[in-house]
Image (cartoon, rainbow, N blue to C red):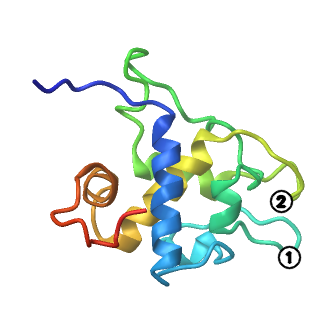
Amino acid sequence: MSTIYEIGSISKTFTGILLAQMVLAGQLKTDDPAQQYLPATVTLPTRGEKQITLGHLSDHSSGLPGMPNNFDPKDPANPFADYTVDQMYTFLKGYTLTRDIGAGYEYSNLAQGLLGHILSLKAGKSYEALMVSKIAKPPEDESNQNYL
């Protein structure tokens, strides 16, 4: 039997695992600016001379808010179903950080969603496909070291 259900915030743990796997594989670094993995048409906010890194997105110190102000779900039972990447990009291009990057911690669904999006862009597959292939699907043989 198989049941489909919303996994909610546990996906943030999966995002952290995916980031760690890519770092260990030498595909990226936590101190890489997140901007370098986004299309040239998207501009992340900066503050002073500091850029948001992948590590800042992961540890909730990016300075990004918990939720974007253009988040207006049609279905409260499935609030993220209709929020698009283009909406996220639009928000990020127009957002001004209210505090220094890395200066403190603020739980941010937006930062985690952006990190998951960046990892999927880097891998060349959807977040779901990436998560299933690297975390949820058991290795075919026990010597497979691609799993943490």
Residue 47, picture quadrant: bottom right
Q: Give the label, 2 or 1, closer to the camera.
A: 2
Decide if residue 44 is in sight here. Answer: no
Residue 112, image x and y in percent?
Answer: 56, 49
Decide if residue 22 is in sight here. Answer: yes
Q: Quadrant of the N terminus?
A: top left
Residue placed most toward the observer, 136 or 108: 136
Q: Quadrant of the C terminus?
A: bottom left
Query: 122 above or below 88?
Result: below
Q: CA distance from mark 2 to mark 1?
A: 12 Å
Element type where label 2 sits in the image: loop
Question: Which residue is drawn at the image coordinates 68% and 69% (left, top)?
Answer: 53
Q: Is residue 101 left or right of residue 76?
A: right
Q: Is residue 127 left or right of residue 28?
A: left
Question: Which residue is drawn at the image coordinates 39% and 44% (left, top)?
Answer: 84
Question: Which residue is drawn at the image coordinates 27% and 52% (left, top)?
Answer: 132
Residue placed most toward the observer, 84 or 79: 79
Residue 49's disc number:
1
Q: Earlier in the sequence, mark 2 or mark 1?
A: 1
Query: 14 above or below 38?
Result: above
In this rendering, the count of numbered labels is 2
- Callout 2 amino acid: Gly
Other-residue count near label 2 (Cα within 10 Å), few / some / many at <14 / 14–19 / ≥20:
some
Q: Is residue 86 left or right of residue 96?
A: left
Residue 11, image x and y in percent?
Answer: 45, 41
Element type where label 1 sits in the image: loop
User: Where does label 2 land, which residue?
Assistant: 102
- Callout 1 amino acid: Glu
Residue 16, image x and y in percent?
Answer: 54, 55
